[in-house]
């Protein structure tokens, strides 16, 4: 005996119809979240919005947490598609600013989704879209590092960028509308840029040869490596510095 979900318009009993039903349920839940907030996303409300019987939801998701994880993935995917559609600035620090602005704008435009994503930090963090977003962020950071303008190591830079973007969005959303000054967002973005980048390249000559020469010059002043390690690293740096 078929359920209403099996016989809804555009569906088939095959895998394609099942996927369409799943997508409809996720989009219905995402719509309820956006319009009415987290508490509105109930089994009964989602089923009514998606045009399926409530039991149909649990043929696609183990429980409501599973559905909310799918909504998080849906939101991340939309965000990544937006980021990919924006041209990449030539300057890597300007690219960082643009990416930060996009993340903040997405949060401000989707407050309920953002609160769910970052008020429950574990939700969706192992999803394909989230991993794609992290790869894009690390790509931006590597561009800055390759230009010799990264002030801190890459993991710390990523943490600072995330923390300032999340803090900016959640702080903005917590303020009364008449207390929301756009200067707050600009100040937080520029504080982030100052914390993770330098105004001038640490190494003037582009490429590994220039970086190797700079590190080779600083090597005698460090005490972390043993004498044998310093000697071996010195040989490697000499070979890189000569590769011009």
Image (spheres, rainbow, N blue to C red):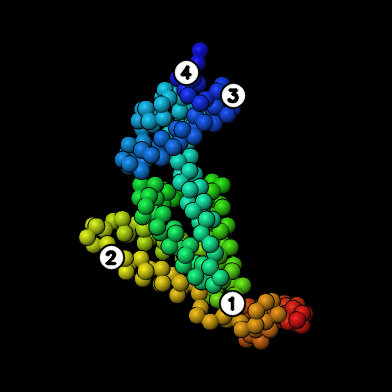
N-term-proximal mark, 1 vs 4 = 4
Residue under numbered circle 3: 14
**Image position of 184 (left or right of 53):** left
Disc 1 target residue: 148
- Image spot of residue 114 (x, y percent): 39, 50
Compared with 90, 122 (above or below) is above
Label 3 sits on a secondary structure element that is loop
Q: Nearer the viewer, residue 180 or 38?
A: 180
Name above or below for residue 32 compared with residue 212: above
Q: Residue at x 53, y 62 (%)?
A: 87
Residue identified by numbered label 4: 3
The relative height of residue 117 versus residue 215 in the rendered view (above or below) is above
Q: Earlier in the sequence, mark 4 or mark 3?
A: 4
Q: CA distance from mark 4 to mark 2?
A: 52 Å
Q: CA distance from mark 1 to mark 2?
A: 34 Å
- Is disc 2 placed on a helix, strand or loop? loop
Q: Quadrant of the C terminus?
A: bottom right
Q: Tell me the element at label 1.
A: loop
Mark 4 Cα within 10 Å, few/some/many (few <14, many 20+)? few
Whole-number angstrom distance, CA of label 4 to CA of label 3: 14 Å
Q: Mark 2 — residue? A: 181
- The image quadrant of residue 50 is top left
Crowding at label 2, few (<14), some or many (≥20) Cα neighbours within 10 Å?
A: few
Residue at 47% over, 23% down: 8
Distance between the alpha carbons at the discs numbered 1 and 3: 54 Å
Q: Could one spot residue 236 in this view of the protein?
A: yes
Residue at coordinates 55% horizontally, 67% vertically from top-left? 141
Q: Residue at x 52, y 55 (%)?
A: 85
- Please say if the residues under marks 4 and 3 sit with CB atoms less than 8 Å apart: no
Residue 197 image offset from top left, x and y in percent = 50, 74
Spatial CA span between label 1 and label 4: 61 Å
């Amino acid at each position: 005996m078929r359920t209403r979900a099996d016989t809804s318009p555009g569906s088939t009993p095959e895998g394609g119809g099942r996927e369409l039903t799943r997508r409809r349920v996720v989009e219905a839940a995402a719509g309820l979240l956006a319009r009415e907030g987290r508490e509105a996303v109930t089994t009964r409300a989602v089923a009514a919005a998606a045009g399926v019987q409530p039991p149909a939801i649990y043929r696609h998701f183990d429980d409501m947490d599973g559905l909310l994880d799918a909504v998080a993935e849906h939101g991340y995917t939309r965000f990544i598609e937006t980021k990919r559609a924006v041209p990449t600035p030539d300057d890597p620090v300007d690219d960082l600013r643009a990416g930060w602005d996009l993340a903040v704008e997405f949060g401000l435009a989707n407050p309920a989704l953002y609160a769910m994503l970052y008020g429950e930090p574990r939700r969706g963090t192992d999803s394909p879209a989230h991993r794609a977003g992290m790869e894009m962020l690390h790509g931006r950071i590597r561009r800055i590092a390759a230009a010799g303008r990264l002030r801190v190591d890459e993991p710390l830079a990523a943490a600072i960028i995330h923390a300032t973007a999340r803090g900016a969005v959640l702080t903005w959303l917590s303020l009364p509308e008449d207390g929301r000054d756009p200067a707050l967002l600009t100040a937080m973005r520029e504080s982030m840029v100052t914390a993770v980048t330098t105004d001038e390249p640490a190494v003037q000559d582009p490429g590994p040869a220039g970086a190797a020469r700079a590190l080779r010059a600083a090597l005698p002043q460090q005490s972390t490596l043993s004498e044998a390690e310093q000697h071996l690293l010195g040989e490697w740096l000499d070979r890189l510095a000569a590769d011009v």
